[in-house]
Image: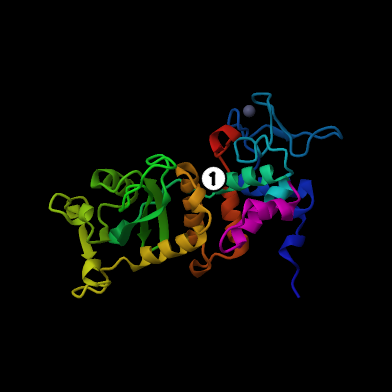
Amino acid sequence: MSDSILSQAQFHNEEAAYAYVEARIWPKGAVCPHCGGVERNKLMGGKSTRIGLYKCYDCRKPFSVKMGTIFESSHIPLRLWLQAIFLIASSKKGVSSNQLHRTLGITLKSAWFMSHRIREAMKDGGLDIFGSSGGDVEVDETFIGRDFTKKPRGSKIGRGYEHKNKVFSLIDRNSGKARSVVVDDLKLSTLLPIMQASIDRNARILTDEAGQYTNRYANLSVYFRDHGFVKHMHGEYVSREDKTVHTNTVEGFFSIFKRGMKGVYQHCGHNHLNRYLAEFDFRYNNRKALGVEDEERADNLLLGVKGKRLTYRTIA
Ligand SMILES: [Zn+2]
């Protein structure tokens, strides 16, 4: 029988936890977050010194690997952060704050704060461009929960989707990766800048027949190499002329997202929804079918902790 992953030292010993995080965030050795110095950083010794405290002899300031990350100014031991990250990264549907609270033995408030910070670490910078070298990119939108910024509680809601949260997602068919954002409306003037920022102009865009993509003003093939669409209204889910024209991948992504969000999204405001989307994108983009196993997924999550410092103010 192989050893349990959870028996590894970084989950139980604070020094091992620091060493584990440092090896990933500073693969070439400590970097001073104040001045960027890499040459003259020294680990502080002594019994009263905090674990993982360095001093930079270029700018003479102290620092640790937690600085400038989601761990900064958290009183929760780093080994518990690593446990939480592993649990969240290796579970298929995510882990509730309540579960973290019970499993890790921390307060519910700490657990809630921790899980939002970890979701923040799952946000990708949106740096890789979809559909490069002429690939196919599926785009679609879906509605989820109620957008209380538009229609306050107790106000009358009509039919249609005006009062719902709107999610816009892109899927690069070659890499199998997803990127999702919450949008205020579904006008082309809102969606096109998002597409242009994420998609190569040589890509082919695949959509359904929704007006914002297909009306005579839209003309997506001006902005991208080509545009294909299916007519869902006519029961067409794969184009009869070209079998590669469909949006089934992105719709599959939405169904995973909706199943996972069930019971949560009712209470989920705009900002929180963006974080949940980051979590679903992350999970989808690091899924087993793409060859990413649990430990690698947890390490990929850990690499996202940099530059994501958050306070209670920014989360609440
Ligand atoms: Zn420095």
Inspect this view and state whether residue 173 appears: no
Q: Is 23 on the left-hand or right-hand side of 198?
A: right
Q: Quadrant of residue 74?
A: top right
Inspect this view and state whether residue 30 appears: yes
At label 1, the amino acid type is Glu
Along the line of sight, which residue is nearer the eye, 97 or 225? 97
Task: Estimate the x, y position of residue 307 in percent, counting from the top left.
Answer: 55, 38
Rendering colour mode = rainbow
Q: Secondary structure at mark 1?
A: helix
Q: In what quadrant of the picture does the C terminus appear?
A: top right
Name above or below for residue 36 compared with residue 270. Answer: above
Residue at 64% across / 24% down in the picture?
Answer: 59
Asked if the residue at label 1 sits under 8 Å from ligand 1, the reply is no
Task: Estimate the x, y position of residue 41 in percent, counting from the top left.
Answer: 69, 33
Q: Is 2 on the left-hand or right-hand side of 23?
A: right
Along the line of sight, which residue is nearer the eye, 146 or 201? 146
Residue 145 magenta-drawn? no
Q: Is 113 on the left-hand or right-hand side of 16?
A: left
Residue at 49% across / 52% down in the picture?
Answer: 265
- Disc 1: which residue: 120
Q: How many marks?
A: 1
Q: Quadrant of residue 174?
A: bottom left
Q: Is 148 on the left-hand or right-hand side of 193?
A: right
**Which region of the structure is painted magenta?**
83-106
Residue 86 magenta-drawn? yes
Name above or below for residue 257 compared with residue 241. Answer: above
Where on the image, by quarter, is ligand 1? top right
Task: Estimate the x, y position of residue 302 in percent, counting from the top left.
Answer: 60, 50
Task: Estimate the x, y position of residue 166 in percent, counting from the top left.
Answer: 37, 50
Dominant SS in magenta: helix
10 Å neighbourhood of mark 1: few (<14), some, or many (≥20)? many
Q: In what quadrant of the picture does the N terminus appear?
A: bottom right
